[in-house]
Amino acid sequence: MARERKFTDDELFKATKSLLIEEGYDAFTFSKLASIMEVSRGSIYKYYENKDELISEFLMYEMNVFLKGFNELDKSGDFQTQFYLVIDFIFQHSEIHQILEIINQIPKKSSNRVSSNQTQLNTYHTDMYKQFQSLIEQGKKERVIKSHLSDAIILGMTFQTIAIPNHFGIPQDEWVASIREILSEGMFQRE
């Protein structure tokens, strides 16, 4: 039996993140989490009634960390400078894509705590997209982005780039630079 021990929220959320990314929402259990952390399941149940409460709290934590970092980016430059910063930032937090998908896997009719967290997570998600959309609008205003292109498509393509698997093991810096170039300049040669 695992020994009883205290743990910090950071330790708990780090282990939760690792387990969710490796095994997914459906396979996530307090038993597996307790084993990773070398604690008893009971020590986790002291704080969370079920996995949905823990996962929704973890998602709140992750979104707060992501949004805090995003808000700290220097937004004083021109569009291209800001766009490059955003792309680099997204790739530094590449798990955010998987994490955002988990929000939709939590059952809608759970505890009040989970429902409240889901409402807040949806607000965070919307706020995040609004911030990125304002960057897209700046690009259109500076005539760097074609005005007829849909903001939704630009946002979707930008965020989906982090989900592209790097099967060939291209070094991360080169990988990100290539994606940035394709997003900002396209893939066709211009004469």
Image: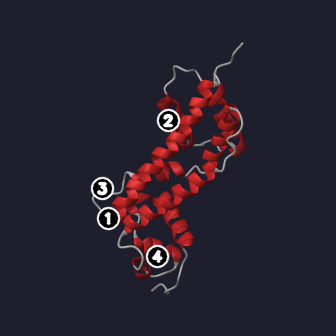
**Which residue is identified by label 1?**
112
Residue 77, compared with residue 106, is above or below; it is above
Q: Secondary structure at mark 4?
A: helix
Q: Residues within 10 Å of mark 2 (few under 14, many from 20)?
A: few
**Would you name the residue on which mark 3 appears?**
108
Q: Alpha-carbon distance for marks 2 and 1?
A: 31 Å
Q: Is residue 132 visible?
A: yes
User: Which-is-in-front pick, marks 2 and 1?
Assistant: 1
Residue drawn at x 55%, y 52% is 95
CA gap between label 3 and label 1 equals: 10 Å
In this rendering, the label closer to the viewer, 4 or 1: 1
**Residue 149 image offset from top left, x and y in percent:** 51, 23
Element marked by disc 3:
loop
Residue 64: quadrant of the picture: bottom right
Question: Distance from label 3 to label 2 (Cα)?
Answer: 25 Å
Q: Which mark is residue 34?
A: 4
Q: Residue at x 54, y 78 (%)?
A: 7
The secondary structure type at the circle numbered 1 is helix
- Image quarter where the C terminus lies is top right
Residue 4 vs residue 119: left or right? right
Question: Could one spot residue 186 in this view of the protein?
Answer: no
Determine which quarter of the picture holds residue 162.
Answer: top right
Task: Look at mark 2 in the image and give the residue it sits on.
Answer: 156
Q: Nearer the viewer, mark 3 or mark 1?
A: 1
Question: What is the secondary structure assignment of the residue under circle 2?
Answer: helix
